[in-house]
Amino acid sequence: MRSFKTFSGISAGVLLALAGGAQAATTGTDFLVTANVVASCSVVATDLAFGDFDGSGNLADTSTISVTCTNGHGYSIALDAGDAASTSIANRTLENATGDLLTYNLYTDLNHTAIWGDTGTTDVDGTGTGLTTDVDHTVYGLLPVAGNETATTGLYSSTIAVTVTY
C-alpha cells in the first residue's frame, strides 16, 4: 500500500508541476495620439501721440503694432482710414470737438513714402514666430504743416482699426 501512496503522491506532484508551468496569455492593441496645430494670432498696438502742434514744423511720432502668431504662419496687417470725418487712406484726418480737421498720415517706413493702408492697398506682411513671441511692426506717423496752417486750437483725435488677417 505504501507504494500506492507514493505513486499517488508522485502523480499529484506531476500534475501540480504541469499546472504551475503554464504560461499567462496576453493581448494588446495600439491607439493613435494626434494634435492639430491651428493658426492663431493676437495683436496689440500702442497709441501714437504727435504732441503739441504750433505750425512751426512737421510733427512725427511712432506706434508699435505687436503681432503674436503661430510659428511659421503668415499674416498681413491693415490699418483703416480712421473714424474722423472726411478721412480716407490717402488723406487721414484728426478731428476736434467742433469738427475741425488736421491732416496726417501713417506710413510703413521712416521716410514717410509708403502709406500704410488697408487690405488691397499697402498693408504689411509678417510671419509668426510662436505664440509666446511678439513680432513688432513700427507705424510711422507724420502730421505736416502743409495743409494744416489754419488749424484752430483744441485736442484732435482719430481711432484707427488694426486688422490682422491670417
Image: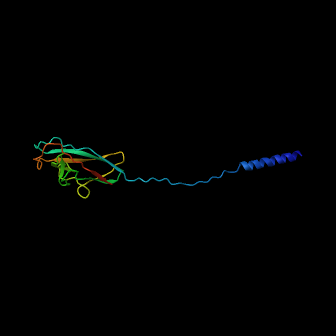
Q: Nearer the viewer, residue 57 or 157?
A: 157
Q: Is residue 33 left or right of residue 112?
A: right
Instruction: Choose between 102 and 122: the one closer to the eye.
Output: 102
Outermost residue on the bottom side: it is 120
- From the viewer's side, name the closer residue of 133 and 123: 123
Residue at the image position 34 percent from the left and 53 percent from the top: 73
Residue lying furthest front? 98
On the picture, is 25 further left or further right than 29?
A: right
Colouring scheme applied when the structure was drawn: rainbow
Question: Measured from the top left, where is residue 101 in percent x and y?
Answer: 16, 49
Counting the numbered discs, the total is: 0
Q: Which residue is at the front of the view, 20 or 160?
A: 160
User: Where residue 33 sits in the image (x, y, percent)?
Assistant: 49, 53
Q: In which quarter of the image is residue 63?
A: top left
Q: In which quarter of the image is residue 58?
A: top left
Picture coordinates of residue 162, whole percent (x, y): 27, 50
Residue lying furthest top in this view? 52
Q: Position of residue 91 (x, y in %)?
A: 17, 53
Q: Which residue is drawn at 78% across and 47% down?
A: 13
In the image, is 25 to the left or to the right of 62?
A: right
Quadrant assignment for the C terminus: bottom left
